[in-house]
Amino acid sequence: MTKLPSHELKSKSQQIFTDRFGMPTYHALGRYKVVDYNLISVTVCPQCLYASPDKKDFITRDPAARTKEIPARLHQGELAAILAAADERATWLTTQSLDAMKDILPRTRTPEAGLASYELAILRAKIEFSRNVPFSAYKMAGYTLKKSVICRTYGMDEMPHLAQALKYYLLCFERSNAPGFQFEGHVLHQVIALGMRTGQLELAGSYLGVLDRSKMRLEAGKADAQVVSTFLRWYNAARELWADRENPDIWDVRAS
């Protein structure tokens, strides 16, 4: 298909708060209306239900030369495997009592449709993971955190999604699915934060030790300055979070 509906948010139109996991929530700014970009950030093909919040996963046009195509980031083998599972995604969407054209494609997605769009993206990433594509588990975890934000925003239980995101981040770390110290720092931060949020302080504390050892390995090497800076940002955030663990407002979005 061509000209799939895909949305971008102008930063000046919304006030954005991030939670302790780095996930955004959107609030009206000035004369603009509230736009919950979490609901509409995933682009979905209504035919095969291929879904991703990242435009690099689709074929796009070069803005400098409109006749030139920019290929999708995924290789043809992965794209073929994802396309082959289209019927499974369609069956899953039916079980949610949702219709691709009526519920998923419109800009005015309901919370249920927003959750479904991210689940479709997770189903795509699971196929990537089965084919050993780097960052696939990392994306599964991030998409699941998005689902938790949608649930929190609309009064639904976010805890199952937080618990699932923790499992995906642990899988990502164990399989080295997001290589590089900067990503390792982020993954470990998320494991520690999610462990604390789900009441698994022993797990969180043990991975704080893993994070310390990663920092030692980083300091013993010759990493790029940008990599070091990114790692230390997540390292310091995890340390601050752990030190603040007795604060009753620790998970308040505006406070973080």
Image (spheres, rainbow, N blue to C red):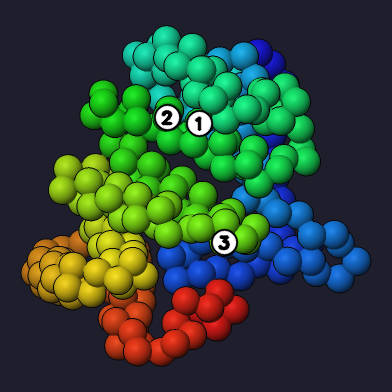
Q: Amino acid at mark 1?
A: Leu
Comparing 219 with 100, the one in front is 100
Residue with the mark numbered 3: 152
Indicate left or right for 147 with 220 as reference.
right
Q: Amino acid at mark 2?
A: Leu
Comparing 82 with 2, the one in front is 82
Badge 3: residue crowd in 10 Å (few <14, some 14–19, many ≥20): few
The image quadrant that residue 82 belongs to is top left
User: In the rendered view, would you say 232 is above or below 121?
Assistant: below
**Alpha carbon separation for disc pair 3 and 1:** 20 Å
Comparing 175 with 193, the one in front is 193
> Which of label 3 and label 1 is nearer to you?
3
Q: Secondary structure at mark 3?
A: helix
The label number, if any, that marks residue 123 in the structure image: 2
Badge 1: residue crowd in 10 Å (few <14, some 14–19, many ≥20): many
**Alpha carbon separation for disc pair 2 and 3:** 22 Å
- Point out the image quarter for the N terminus: top right
On the question of residue 55 being in view, the answer is no
On the question of residue 196 being in view, the answer is yes
Q: Residue at x 45, y 16 (%)?
A: 88
Q: Amino acid at mark 3?
A: Arg
Badge 2: residue crowd in 10 Å (few <14, some 14–19, many ≥20): many
Instruction: Give percent across and percent down for residue 252.
Output: 53, 78
Tell me which numbered mark, 3 or 1, is placed earlier along the sequence.
1
Q: Secondary structure at mark 1?
A: helix
Residue with the mark numbered 1: 120
User: In the rendered view, would you say 10 is above or below 92?
Assistant: below
